[in-house]
Amino acid sequence: MADEKVREVKGPGPRGQRGMPKPKIKNPGKLLKRLMGYVFKFYGLQMILVGICIVVSVLANIQGTLFTKTLIDGYINPLLRTAGEGGTPDFGPLGFAILRVAVFYAIGITASYVQSLTMVFITQGTLKNLRAALFEHMESLPIKYFDTNAHGDIMSIYTNDIDTLRQMISQSIPQLLNSAITIVSVLLSMIFLNIPLTVLTIIMVALMLFASTKAASASGKNFVKQQKNLGKLNGYIEEMMNGEKVIKVFCHEEKTIEDFDKYNEELFQSAYKANAFSALLGPINAQLGNISYVLCALLGGALALTTSSSTGAGVAFFLVLVQLFGSLSVGSLASFLTFNKSFSMPINQVSMQFNSIIMALAGAERVFRLLDEKPEMDEGYVMLVNAENRDGKIVEVDHHTGFWAWKHYHKAEGTTDYKPLEGDVTFNGVDFGYTDEKMVLHDIVLHAEPGQKIALVGSTGAGKTTITNLINRFYDIQDGKIRYDNININKISKKDLRRSLGIVLQDTHLFTGTVAENIRYGKLDATDEEVYAAARLANADSFIKRLPDGYDTMLTGDGANLSQGQRQLLAIARAAIADPPVLILDEATSSIDTRTEKIVQDGMDKLMANRTTFVIAHRLSTIRNSDCILVMEQGRIIERGNHEELLAKKGRYYQLYTGKKAETA
């Protein structure tokens, strides 16, 4: 909102945390309805069973409390009179009545056990479904989402926010339902016993609700803020863990700890305030409940004394009480006082659960916000298929042949044609900006013929990597056309488009698994022989065989037990096994030594053979043999040509390559 104050976070910290507004849950009722709808969608029958069990359990307790009246007025007092008159008391009816009550209690205990067991199943099942839905949806989100949201904050949704839902579903929801049924049942029972005492009880409960609402409102706001701060802290920890080497290189441990203490203090303050106000609810409601009990005991005792005796001092006063409030037996008073406690207890429990629900709704809001993020749209209809060339005609097949074709269905004509995948890439007047207000690329024109090697060079931030991100449609352009084999890439299914591209990045990411599994990631159904062949092509086979378990060596921590060069060779092997017609090499040798670079470069040269390749490199010696070199500055192509042509121009490329001042603008 416009009038909300915004706090600027200075220095390193979680992405996406600048300018955060004050936390506030929007439409909590709608949010709760959506969450319960999600629960009932999968576990509707089980929730009905839980409701039945709660009703049975509550009624079992109600009948036990009402039996107190019958026990005193219907059994104990008559037996005492019989004994006082010299007769022999008959305890048979009393024993049978107690046995009947015990049976009802046993049924209630069984129902309570079934309810608890069922809620565990419902809770864990719902959380499993939510995690699955979150992860599945997260995989459909565009790269932009992960660029603009701290990874630790996203992780906090899977852990902390999901855990708050566990508490709410397993404890708060059943407790609220139990409390609601208990309140209604107890209220009806108290009205049955004595209306004036019931009115007195309700007045005290109203005071409890008023006090609870005030305290809960104050704590609820801070519970929401607590979840926000927890996400920020997790995001900061995750970011600092990833940058631990950089922190130590620059000796910024103290500054990092200082920033952590700031985020940690913010979490402490919000958590302290939330739980401090929450802690007030118990004592406030307990004391008001005790006062209610005392007042009812005083008035009820006076009525019971009037009913049982009409002699002695103060008879006139007691008669007035009876006329105003009605008579009350000792048994009825005993039952009513028990109900008074039972009536106050669920009110107290509701107020205590209120904060858990607020905190859970804050978590649910973050969960559903992620689920509501717009997935990456894909309206492409041109598919990449396995094919064979039979007598000059391309035919689609259902097995891998090493020959790929674009399957293009023409809806207007109702026909389908096939075109060989060759790797011809064209940019025609492309403009692009991550936001419409700030363009990054301007009028990009380039043409990569099948098998050509295109190099992109220029200063940092010139737009080199952005061009490669547009080829695989991590982002969509604002203007112009990008064609792949003369097909507008907007018409190509994103999954099939990306399947046709092999990418080797500067920062290689390896997954937890064996060396063979990491290579096979480029083609999940690859045979062992294909894995070995890809490793040999990438010059990785020799070092892999020297590992403790060879291809079965387990990699963890993003391949931390390998050198940077070895990790790059595995990335090349992973791209090689996919056998893509187009390659994108983004500074793949910039962070390795010269000797290792020669090995990696040799592996890349083998991989680039007969493939259209886009190379981004700061080491210009690695791209001298490129068919075309594009020199970029501030999102524009300012020079183009091969190595010799650009050196002859003595322009920007000449300056970058020789370190000498350019002779042309």
Image (cartoon, grey):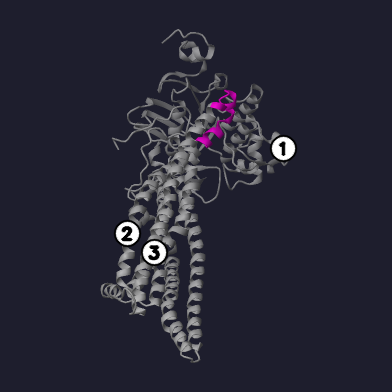
Q: Measure the alpha-carbon separation of dots 3 and 1.
A: 79 Å
Q: Crowdedness of circle 2 by 10 Å Cα count: few (<14), some, many (20+)? A: few
Q: Which residue is mark 1?
A: 547
Is 181 displayed left or right of 135 in the figure? left
Percent of width and height locating residue 452: 51, 28
Query: Up-down: is 354 above or below 315?
Result: above
Chain-order first, disc 3 or disc 1 = 3
SS for tag 1? loop
Q: Are marks 1 and 2 in contact (CB under 8 Å)?
A: no
Is 599 displayed left or right of 646 in the figure? right
Give the residues drawn in magenta, as a range.
236-254
Inspect the magenta stretch and tell me whether residue 431 lies in it.
no
Closer to the observer: label 2 or label 3?
Answer: 3
Amino acid type, mark 2: Ala
Q: Identify the mark at residue 206; answer none if there is no mark.
A: 2
Q: Quadrant of the N terminus?
A: top left
- Kindly tell me whether residue 394 is visible in this rendering: no
Q: Quadrant of residue 463?
A: top left
Query: Up-down: is 351 above or below 546?
Result: below
Percent of width and height locating residue 82: 46, 89
Amino acid type, mark 3: Val
Q: Which residue is mark 3?
A: 294
In this view of the protein, which residue sits in the foreground, 135 or 318? 318
In this view of the protein, which residue sits in the foreground, 137 or 517? 137
Q: Identify the mark at residue 7; answer none if there is no mark.
A: none
Q: Please tell me which residue is depicted at 48% across the width and 67% down the height of the picture.
A: 115
Q: Please tell me which residue is depicted at 62% across the width and 30% down the height of the picture.
A: 564
Chain-order first, disc 1 or disc 2 = 2
SS for tag 3? helix
Closer to the observer: label 1 or label 2?
Answer: 2
Query: Up-down: is 315 above or below 586?
Result: below
- Kindly tell me whether residue 611 is visible in this rendering: yes
